[in-house]
Amino acid sequence: MQEREVGRGAVNLRRKSKMIARDRVMRNLLWVMVAVLICILPLTMAANAAYSYLLMTGNVALALLLCAAVLVLLVLPLIYGLMHYLMDVLFCHRGSLLTVFDALGSRYNYVRSLKLGLCVALRSVLWMSIPVALTVGYCYLALVRDPSIVQDAEKFYALAGQLSLFYLVVSTPFIGRVLRYAGAYALAVRAQGMGAWQATKTAARVFRGQGVRLTVLVLSFLGWQLFGIWTMGIGTLFYWGYLLSTMIAYTWYLEHPEKQTEPPSDTPDR
């Protein structure tokens, strides 16, 4: 009976987090999508420029260096600002789009956002390297069984589809583990004195024992993810705003178990 109550409480917690996030994001739908686009656009433009440069020169190293530089020096600070903006949307029912550029307006916040982003990226890469290795292994076995796949376009595209589906399946549990570090941004924005590594450790501790529940949470967004693909990426802007907002709300509820029957207050504790 007690285990059933705990399971029901976990389901209610996920539903409440999603309900609050959806409600607040829908009220600011256009601006949330623009905020997500601001984070994605620089990396997309850099990737296109790097690809064009690669076709012209064949220099792979400089193309990768360009993408990495844009990711670290520009996108990571923008992600920090995006999480800050989504916190304002969740807790204050409103937010200024200029908050997305918050880390770019202060040297202290800029350096802090880089440290936090690199810590989250390092932990995320360590986890996501597992499904990548499994997908590479699957690809290797497929090529060993039928080497003609490389020369046959139809077989090659079929294998690419299989690899995409295989990676989507095996990466889902690990995405749940990676997403718990989204809570590190909420903790770092609220507590300005908290270090980057401490924020990621605290987020991991807050979500301890929530691995399966986070996996279920990620799976519950699968429909929105497919919607984003079907709309040529436009729906992805809503998907990421909704997902990250849910993670922020979920983090808040785990930090305040005594307030699980109430939505986050209008004045967040910062």
Image: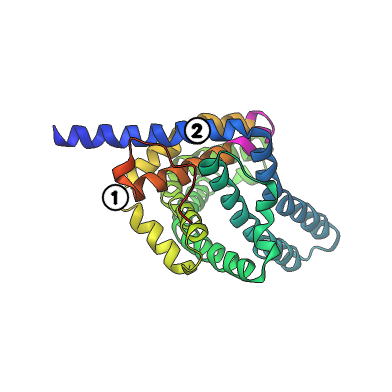
Q: Is residue 173 visible?
A: no
Q: Is residue 257 visible?
A: yes
Q: Secondary structure at mark 2?
A: helix
| Position of residue 92 measured from the top left corner of the image (x, y, whole percent) | 54, 42
The amino acid marked with disc number 2 is Leu
Q: Secondary structure at mark 1?
A: loop
- Residue furthest to the left in view is 1
Residue at x 35%, y 47% (from the top left corner) = 254
- Residue furthest to the right in view is 56
| Position of residue 211 measured from the top left corner of the image (x, y, whole percent) | 34, 47
* Residue that label 2 marks: 222
Magenta residues: mostly which secondary structure?
helix
| Of residues 176 and 38, the one drawn nearer to the viewer in this rendering | 38
Establish if 4 lies above or below 126.
Answer: above
Badge 1, how many Cα within 10 Å: few under 14, some, many 20+?
few
- Name which of mark 2 and mark 1 comes first in the sequence: 1
Q: Is residue 235 magenta?
A: yes
Residue at x 56%, y 38% (from the top left corner) = 93
* Residue that label 1 marks: 209
| Position of residue 85 measured from the top left corner of the image (x, y, whole percent) | 60, 48
- Residue furthest to the front in view is 267
Q: Is residue 57 magenta?
A: no
Residue at x 50%, y 44% (from the top left corner) = 167
Q: Quadrant of the N terminus?
A: top left
Establish if 223 lies above or below 78.
Answer: above
Badge 2, how many Cα within 10 Å: few under 14, some, many 20+?
few
Label 2 or label 1, whichever lies nearer to me, is 1
State the extent of the magenta-drawn residues as a range: 230-238
Quarter of the view holding residue 235: top right
